[in-house]
Amino acid sequence: MQKFRNIAAFSTIPSYFTLDPNQISARNPHKAQNFLRGKWIDSHKYQTIIDPLNGEPFITVPDVQDKQELQKFIDSAKECPISGLHNPLKNPQRYQLYGEVCHKIAAELKKKEVHDFLVRLIQRVVPKHFAQASGEVVVTERFFQNFSGDQPRFLTRSFNVAGDRPGQQSSGYRWPFGSCAVVAPFNFPLEIPSLQIFGALITGNKVFFKGDSRVNVVMEQMLRLALHCGLPATDVDMLFGNGEATEFILKQGNFRNTQFTGSSKVAEHLTKVLNGKIRIEDAGFDWKILGPDVPDVDTQNYVAWQSDQDAYGSTGQKCSAQSILFVHENWVKAGFLDKIKQLASTRKLQDLSNGPIITWNNTQIKQHIDNILKIPQSKVLFGGQELKNHTIPSIYGAFEPTALYVPLDQIQKNKAVTTELFGPFQIVTTYSSDQINQVLDVINNLENHLTAGIVSNDVNFLRHVQSNTTNGVTYSGIRARTNWCSPKSLVWTMWRSKRSRYRHS
Amino acid sequence: MQKFRNIAAFSTIPSYFTLDPNQISARNPHKAQNFLRGKWIDSHKYQTIIDPLNGEPFITVPDVQDKQELQKFIDSAKECPISGLHNPLKNPQRYQLYGEVCHKIAAELKKKEVHDFLVRLIQRVVPKHFAQASGEVVVTERFFQNFSGDQPRFLTRSFNVAGDRPGQQSSGYRWPFGSCAVVAPFNFPLEIPSLQIFGALITGNKVFFKGDSRVNVVMEQMLRLALHCGLPATDVDMLFGNGEATEFILKQGNFRNTQFTGSSKVAEHLTKVLNGKIRIEDAGFDWKILGPDVPDVDTQNYVAWQSDQDAYGSTGQKCSAQSILFVHENWVKAGFLDKIKQLASTRKLQDLSNGPIITWNNTQIKQHIDNILKIPQSKVLFGGQELKNHTIPSIYGAFEPTALYVPLDQIQKNKAVTTELFGPFQIVTTYSSDQINQVLDVINNLENHLTAGIVSNDVNFLRHVQSNTTNGVTYSGIRARTNWCSPKSLVWTMWRSKRSRYRHS
Amino acid sequence: MQKFRNIAAFSTIPSYFTLDPNQISARNPHKAQNFLRGKWIDSHKYQTIIDPLNGEPFITVPDVQDKQELQKFIDSAKECPISGLHNPLKNPQRYQLYGEVCHKIAAELKKKEVHDFLVRLIQRVVPKHFAQASGEVVVTERFFQNFSGDQPRFLTRSFNVAGDRPGQQSSGYRWPFGSCAVVAPFNFPLEIPSLQIFGALITGNKVFFKGDSRVNVVMEQMLRLALHCGLPATDVDMLFGNGEATEFILKQGNFRNTQFTGSSKVAEHLTKVLNGKIRIEDAGFDWKILGPDVPDVDTQNYVAWQSDQDAYGSTGQKCSAQSILFVHENWVKAGFLDKIKQLASTRKLQDLSNGPIITWNNTQIKQHIDNILKIPQSKVLFGGQELKNHTIPSIYGAFEPTALYVPLDQIQKNKAVTTELFGPFQIVTTYSSDQINQVLDVINNLENHLTAGIVSNDVNFLRHVQSNTTNGVTYSGIRARTNWCSPKSLVWTMWRSKRSRYRHS
Amino acid sequence: MQKFRNIAAFSTIPSYFTLDPNQISARNPHKAQNFLRGKWIDSHKYQTIIDPLNGEPFITVPDVQDKQELQKFIDSAKECPISGLHNPLKNPQRYQLYGEVCHKIAAELKKKEVHDFLVRLIQRVVPKHFAQASGEVVVTERFFQNFSGDQPRFLTRSFNVAGDRPGQQSSGYRWPFGSCAVVAPFNFPLEIPSLQIFGALITGNKVFFKGDSRVNVVMEQMLRLALHCGLPATDVDMLFGNGEATEFILKQGNFRNTQFTGSSKVAEHLTKVLNGKIRIEDAGFDWKILGPDVPDVDTQNYVAWQSDQDAYGSTGQKCSAQSILFVHENWVKAGFLDKIKQLASTRKLQDLSNGPIITWNNTQIKQHIDNILKIPQSKVLFGGQELKNHTIPSIYGAFEPTALYVPLDQIQKNKAVTTELFGPFQIVTTYSSDQINQVLDVINNLENHLTAGIVSNDVNFLRHVQSNTTNGVTYSGIRARTNWCSPKSLVWTMWRSKRSRYRHS
């Protein structure tokens, strides 16, 4: 298989894994299972997952729809007390147990055969470049290093403040929610669920987990690894099912918190359904500004390379993907637009530097592009065409890395320009120094404010843009990128404050 | 006026106040104003507020319903940039300005004439005992002391973590939301709005504030005090209006956060309307347990006194009011039930140790009591009758401090028992040592988990109950009370995390 | 009195003060007292302090040398238990008491008549410009705002970490030392002692305080103010005495910590005498670098003004005074040296922009200058002469603001160049971009590393210098100054970590 | 070898180790080396170490005394810049490198063959029970887990506070000292040096390490393990040498901080020599109080077992060893003294539950006992005799676990009673409830306040003792022990605060 050339055929696969990522195919499909009350269990109904690169069926996963089958997950969730499986005053030894489990998982993920297995498995279900898939494994491994040893209990350290009179003291604890749900998306099938599930477990919650069925075989295998490393088997339940089944469980399960990562539309719906007991990671229309100060040619090339990565890496299917680029005219003069065009032209299916688009098909993409090109003075900078000679099934998109130019003042007038297309697609515009506040106006009228980049080393320019915008992560400096990594949203959401006061005398 | 005998007629009233709390009456009503864009403004429509002790009109407040009038508040809110009026990188001098303003407000509130004015004004609109009203002023004053000087900028201190390579660094900032709304309830007309509004202002937000029209004259006067102490006049807008008008503004105003304190029902509705962009302080069915260890008689008397305060102070209209009391049989034997009955019998309208019930009228209260008394073995311990010989208007409740006994196993079977009655009312039950887990079962099946008290000095008993329950504030120890003071929920909600990364080389 | 023209004669002096700063003179001297066990007491022996501007006696202070008299201070110190006057578990109500006292002191210091009194009194004993003396009062006032209300107990908040098994928990407390000593210098007679004494008191220590007798009348008056605001009278003892007497008390008093601010030589001696139970604020040979990027003329003028302030403000008698200035040749070309020469020439005794030098006399200063001028290529840039037509007594120095140029390579060879002269004196040198590491070499070979300034907005230049140097405070940016304000060293030194572990079951 | 029966002969020894702990003997001695500038080097002079169990030579270690040889270590130390090998702004990638190294070391220490090797090696040089030696390895392993991944850079996270005006900000960094020294004692040959050396390395320091030559073969082997796991070879130098040689290096090396663990006498001397640039872990005369509340028999037995462990575990040679025990008369009545006597009688050389005493020989021990027995009413409770039939060389002590009774009022009068004997020895006294303040008086007059235990579950008793004493670690609760583990003193000492301010505009 040419396109995965970075990893040779596996000489060894650890015995806790139950498939070979190179071998699953229509003739040799993998059959996944649900996990409930510490046991791998079969379902009454299954669904077939097709290979996103050639449309052939290669995985079979449960598709639970039966209410009685779903009820078992609800019952399991409800058994967890609202004070959690552990908290600073209950079963504190479990903090240490999790510290040991995390250390062992990290040590396991460091092994070449484990790393390669997971990289290849990710690539089979979300075809992306080796560097991107490997990065996902490495970030996950680093997370487990971070919560080794005593770190789980340090994470939940509490505080005391002296009281008003002798014998009185006020304490603040970090308490679990009890039973929690994690609902995760397709694009990072290992990293997002691993961090969210273990963030919740470490702090004493029981977790119900539902991933995207198309990719969730990755977490099915990861869970086997975690159990091998000592994860208490009844702390997590995992379901393969559709949105309707999930919503049924979320509503009935009375979870005290749900961590949802996915589209803004679903997030908004679930917020209402769950009365706000939800924490959300949703979309971003992420911007980058190239400032007035153009550096030396080497650094220019780096900035162009980073821009290509930010827009088109993982086929643009990262919540941190660069969606709009504001290029100062000094950079235009220095030939920046030619550089990114040239870099985009080298992306190809063969090495997965470009790949299938999971949530937008070609018809939708073409429609979006056509709408934008109706705007006066807008034009295609590069790309804009469907891929040819490929076997990607038509339910998925297959498109060239694309950049459309729209003038700044037209962006202000047309909301459609700033709608996110979750694929290898970006808007590019230019501005002059006296237009910077117009740029800020566009930025501050976006719906979401996830991540952003300000490419400049001019301290006053940086401060002007930073202090007048509001993104979750803003990356600044001459080598800035668009980037998302919020330990808080990914990990630390799963506790609540609990205050204790004492008055002993 | 006999009942306010604790404060003599005012010799001096600071000139920034615009009324005399002793003098407002049907013949001399106070007319309140809205505050918008730094100016006190009149409305097209007004509403009359009646004296809760005698039903006579004594205050006139705006009752804005006109869409154009409301639109002006929306326009003002939208003018605030999403990066706030200040943030750690923008206008940092405003942190110091707020430090000075807070210091000056605290110094002002410390003056006897200011303290007494506010106590009396609170008593006129929410009749409560001098000690309770004074406590509200003192807590507010303390808050302003706490945010004096450099404390606003210390509150928003940010952090840096070293990056992956030279020139790289990651920073976490505490950023304002921009434009925020505060919607406050009737029961603490000074404390709750003051802490929430200034918590939001200090961190860089612009605030739209809506209080309960029946009591909001208190914040109208407090705002005048704050302006006198240097509050920037255009940082806060304040509206007198009904729920419909408020919802119109909240929906159209596009606030990035709303702090709501009030009923669970409204909270749930607003959560849906505002897509979860809301932080909520709602109801509590607060419990207290008297443990197996009965102390010396003096301490027993203290515990009885505290229990009476927790259940009936402020006529039971505190979110922290004791709603259910679990009495260990050892305490029953020691005569505890007689003690609280005796204490309740001394409460009276004359000194406002009992007063009008704002949100439940007598018909509703009687209905609730009758429902509970249908439960087998339940009975009235004391109270249970309407007040006599009073002038409280019939839209408000007027009732004796009441305790109903319901057996533990019946509470488990009847959800109605654990419905909150926001007035001078509590459920009392008894248990033996081998029933403690039954008690925990009742507690953990309550809807809300606001505050709780565990009266014991037995470390193992305390730990058993603490570690198996989950309340916002749990008060433990032989002199424990039910108590609510969450600086986080009242004050520190109004920022969001913002991460910056730098890569300069 | 021409030179204090900024403050008119006092119309009002608060009654807790016991002198009029304008009136003390040879004919009307002030007689100061010691403070012990809550009482102002006389001594057996007194000393006369002369007016630093004209040599006339104007204050009489105790000069305790008698062992029996000293023993009383030792006895008082020893009475404080090693667990302090309060700690998080003992007398916690005292945290609140101190919060109230701090608030009241701040409110008092905000009053114009109090501010002006202290400014004038500081100017009488340490003649410095109004702006400098006023700054000292304002910083002190701000400190007390910062520790108002609940801040003392927030400052000493403790933490808990979950234990290894049920019933176990580990807590970290901030505990007082018990009895502490504060020994303060002459140059900031209000700010340094106030912050250090109250930093120690807030955290539960009892304080023995000894200031510089020449200036300590300022703290004598400040202590009266603090007592007026509710300071518990027996928490502080204050002695007027010489170094020998102080050392006797420090040795015998068995203080568990001593905060010493003063010369490196005395600090080193006390470290040995007190077996290391000491925290030290000593000298600094503070540097500033003007980087390669020269800004617009307005900013250049600001940088020159700031440089003049840093070198010669308070007659150079600040531990943060600029001792050596590295000027990039680009700044030389822009005329920077002429600018600072011109600014220095406007300093004069009349407005105290120049004044008496307390610890170096003219003979010592001339000797130091002569030694440096022997170095090849070194020269006087400006100043270098004694003042004329003045009445400063000869035990003090009286000298023009002076700058000597020494070539960079000569500084590397001559240690004498980098000896601190505590007066209006600086070394100036120049460098080119390829000499920056030579500059760093000079800097890193200095004995002390107190404060520093890097005047540049070039992010890479800033990072290179910052990351390769190590000062207590480094000020960076185009408007950087030399500056010292370490809340930690001034305030937060007076606690120790105490860890508690619990295992209840 | 009977006495190490817990570990069988090694089947595998990792190749980075250079000896077999079972095999070293007079016929097969191990020859250790110094480590300098990344290389293992020989010395001109060597010293023979004898087996503490039989007096036979079994290890040869360098005994560097030559000034030129020592100078090489000084030169190496001086090469480290004062801004360290890395800091938050310099080489930040090294934080991650150390995170990886720590993870790998932890994973290595988890391997049975590595754990067993180190346990046996520790037992050869400091004969102690398997449980004690294993505990040392496990604590060390846990430390390395704690600093895995991103934890080194989280440890040094810095903060920012908003400035006074736009463009201004204040930052606090955790900066290395540069070149540091670690001097470690004999009793924990693996744990103390490992934690102190790596605590210093992680934060960017270069380390000069000197252990006790008698035991330092343990760190010689540990260093080989660390190098195998990726420790940068030139970050640590390690010397075998005597006190004189060490002092020479410490004085000349100009270390900016020295971490010293050892006797109070040497600590005091070094404080003077190094002008206070030292952090000290020294002796403790550790106390335990059994409170008035006697629990059930099982718990009594646990308390007796713990008391025996605290006094005699590791042959009493832990800084946390229980030196004095205050037994409430209620415990005496319950037969506590018989229980600890019985437990002590089971300790024996065969399983190293008793062993050689490294710093006190039998003559010194007998002298100390005789002195105490001269005190009226004092007596031997148990022990008090030399061991018989053993081969421990006479330079070391060999003594029975011993307890002497001294009446409470005699302890107050005789300072000698509270002198630490670093061996299996304790003072036992009794008290009644009305004597508790006399107990506190004894405690508060001790020289050192390291660790303490309060065995009680009575909250008021606990608070009374806790709030009136001041120890580094106080262990409270019915299962309390004497215990020392201060992450701060062992690990986090090796940084200094550095404040940066910025003013960019």
Image: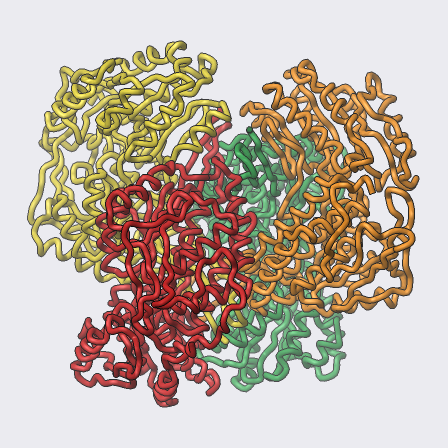
Chain colours: A red, B yellow, C green, D orange
Task: Name the quadrant of the N terminus of chain B.
Answer: top left
Left or right, A293 with respect to A115, comes to: left
Where residue D331 appears, as percent x and y from the top left, is: 66, 18
Picture residue at 50% right of the left edge, 26% below the top: B460
Where residue B419 appears, as percent x and y from the top left, is: 23, 29
Task: Compare residues D196 and C388 and report the one nearer the observer.
Answer: D196
Is residue A208 visible in the rendered image? The answer is yes
Picture residue at 33% right of the left edge, 57% below the top: A61
Residue A82 versus residue B434 in the image, above or below: below
Q: How many marks?
A: 0
Question: Quadrant of the rendered structure where residue A170 is?
Answer: top left
Task: Compare residues A213 and B177 and report the one nearer the observer.
Answer: A213
Where residue C433 appears, as percent x and y from the top left, is: 59, 83
Where residue A200 appears, as percent x and y from the top left, is: 41, 48
Question: Quadrant of the rendered structure where residue C247 is?
Answer: top right
Picture residue at 65% right of the left edge, 26% below the top: D303
Is residue C285 visible in the rendered image? The answer is no
Left or right, A484 with respect to A421, comes to: right
